[in-house]
């Protein structure tokens, strides 16, 4: 072999996600050389960055050796190191493509990327054929996966060596036809912290998904204070983790809650990130404006963390862990209001039981209603927005806690003048005098929302969201 090698290329096939790769062969009188896997070049051409962790070689002595169809629970990148083979693939994933078949002759200059859920088979066309494949999960003899019969006429595969003369294992000959095949479901989404304000809102956002594609875990299902339990949890079949759990007792984090804050907000996130990295999952991690000191505003995504207290520091540490996952959405939010204890609920109680509250005027931001936060998270996932950091709150004018309290009173038909203004310093002094810890809070919490808007998401104005929230939570 000599002369100029054909260029590297990636081509689509009739099965979604099944890609063929044209590999340049560099040859001379000695033989040839090829780069079977080149991450940077191939990913740039459209091959998934699938993170192989194991390479396997199958030596096949005789022509007509036939293996498959198997749909293992991992992605594969395969090719022929020596000899020639006939490859065949069948889509066993749920959806309109189920049963679609592709065939192709494989030589040293061709490779194929096979996504999870697509069954793979091959038959050797030359003696001493060596079949090579990289996988992104470690092979296990206990792995369960669907398989179908090589000779099912529904598939229409014309094997070069008829199967009655081919070398086929008894197990492969006994595989069921396509009509009896188990359909491979899509990778599931797991929501952690399912009983919190955001977790409950995410339940609503995914209420229409009745196929088990989203699973909600509470603290009883998985205690995030136990990092070992996180790593040992059964994550099989999971493609996305949404970490909606957090230790949010901001003031207690300065005292007896410090250890729990770090366990949940930092150590647990590190363990979750380890799982997501190893299994190539997408991680959605929710953080807070408390990672900033409030001296800059509005806060942009590229602002360096500058936490004022233990809670903010624990959340900043969790952010660093989450950003170590290649496929991550780090969503910072502020002033969350949902189904649970929150500022709006407290003000409603004050309005209705005759209490006249004293509320801080010199801390500003925008509230984030949990339904809107859940909608934004689902938008990022469903739209395939670029991975990275996003700021998410409701839209509208920047307000103080005092302004928000008055708005709650007004919406409920109570006199907003019952709300008395105070300063953050005076508020802290009052509680410190009573012996209660008070964490320092950022004076400005408002976010720049332009990066989120660039993905096609327009946050609802907070004034409208407040009205809807009060009507729903009577």
Image (tube, grey):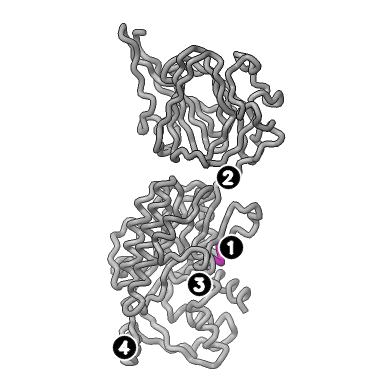
Q: Residue at x 49, y 65 (%)?
A: 193
Q: Which residue is mark 4?
A: 432
User: Is the residue 373 above or below the residue 50 in the image?
Assistant: below
Comparing labels 4 and 2, the label whose residue is closer to the camera: 2
What secondary structure is found at the residue carrying circle 3? strand
Q: Residue at x 67, y 36 (%)?
A: 181
Mark 3 or mark 1, earlier in chain: 1
Q: Which residue is mark 1?
A: 203
Mark 1 or mark 2, earlier in chain: 2
* Magenta-drawn stretch, dominant element (helix, strand or loop): helix
What secondary structure is found at the residue carrying circle 1? helix
Residue 66: within the magenta?
Answer: no
**Circles 3 and 2 in contact, beta carbons < 8 Å:** no
User: Is the residue 211 above or below the residue 356 in the image?
Assistant: above
Mark 4 or mark 2, earlier in chain: 2
The label shown at residue 337 is 3
What secondary structure is found at the residue carrying circle 2? loop
Residues in magenta? 198-203
Q: Residue at x 40, y 16 (%)?
A: 6
Q: Quadrant of residue 464?
A: bottom right
Comparing labels 3 and 2, the label whose residue is closer to the camera: 2
**Circles 4 and 2 in contact, beta carbons < 8 Å:** no
Q: CA distance from mark 4 to mark 2?
A: 53 Å
Q: CA distance from mark 3 to mark 4?
A: 26 Å
Q: Which residue is mark 2?
A: 186
Comparing labels 3 and 1, the label whose residue is closer to the camera: 1
Q: CA distance from mark 3 to mark 2?
A: 32 Å
What secondary structure is found at the residue carrying circle 4? helix
User: Is the residue 419 above or below the residue 454 in the image?
Assistant: below
- The residue nearer to you, when weighing 283 against 388, is 283
């Amino acid at each position: 072999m000599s002369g100029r090698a054909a260029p590297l290329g990636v081509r689509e096939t009739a099965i979604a996600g099944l890609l063929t790769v044209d590999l340049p062969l560099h040859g001379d009188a000695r033989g040839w050389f090829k780069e079977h896997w080149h991450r940077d070049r191939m990913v740039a051409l459209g091959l998934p960055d699938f993170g192989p962790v194991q390479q396997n070689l199958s030596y096949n002595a005789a022509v007509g050796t036939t293996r498959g169809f198997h749909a293992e629970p991992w992605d594969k990148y395969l090719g022929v190191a020596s000899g020639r083979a006939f490859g065949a693939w069948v889509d066993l994933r749920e959806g309109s493509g189920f049963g679609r078949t592709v065939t192709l002759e494989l030589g040293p200059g061709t490779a194929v990327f096979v996504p999870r859920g697509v069954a793979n088979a091959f038959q050797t066309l030359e003696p001493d054929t060596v079949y090579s494949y990289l996988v992104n999960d470690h092979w296990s003899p206990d792995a369960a996966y669907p398989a179908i019969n090589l000779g099912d006429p529904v598939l229409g595969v014309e094997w070069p060596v008829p199967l009655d003369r081919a070398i086929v294992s008894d197990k492969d000959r006994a595989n069921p036809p396509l009509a009896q095949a188990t359909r491979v479901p899509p990778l599931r989404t797991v929501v952690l912290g399912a009983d919190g304000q955001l977790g409950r809102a995410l339940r609503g956002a995914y209420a229409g998904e009745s196929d088990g594609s989203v699973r909600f875990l509470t603290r009883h299902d998985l205690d995030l204070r136990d990092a070992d339990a996180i790593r040992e949890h059964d994550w099989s079949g999971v493609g996305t983790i949404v970490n909606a759990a957090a230790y949010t007792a901001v003031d207690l984090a300065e005292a007896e809650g410090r250890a729990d804050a770090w366990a949940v907000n930092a150590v647990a996130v590190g363990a979750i990130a380890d799982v997501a990295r190893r299994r190539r999952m997408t991680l959605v991690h929710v953080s807070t404006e408390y990672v900033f000191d409030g001296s800059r505003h509005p806060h942009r995504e590229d602002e360096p963390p500058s936490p004022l207290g233990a809670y903010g520091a624990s959340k900043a540490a969790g952010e660093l862990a989450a950003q170590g996952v290649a496929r991550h959405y780090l969503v910072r939010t502020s002033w969350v209001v949902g189904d649970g204890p929150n500022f709006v609920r407290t003000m409603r109680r004050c309005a209705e039981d005759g209490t006249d509250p004293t509320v801080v005027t010199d801390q500003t931001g925008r509230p984030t209603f949990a339904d809107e936060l859940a909608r934004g998270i689902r938008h990022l996932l469903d739209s395939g927005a670029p991975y990275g950091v996003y700021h998410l709150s409701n839209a509208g004018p920047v307000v103080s806690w005092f302004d928000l309290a008055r708005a709650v009173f007004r919406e409920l038909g109570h006199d907003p003048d019952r709300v008395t203004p105070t300063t953050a310093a005076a508020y802290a002094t009052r509680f410190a005098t009573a012996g209660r810890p008070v964490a320092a809070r950022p004076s400005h919490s408002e976010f720049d929302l332009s990066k989120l808007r660039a993905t096609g998401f327009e946050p609802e104005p907070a004034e409208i969201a407040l009205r809807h929230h009060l009507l729903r939570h009577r």
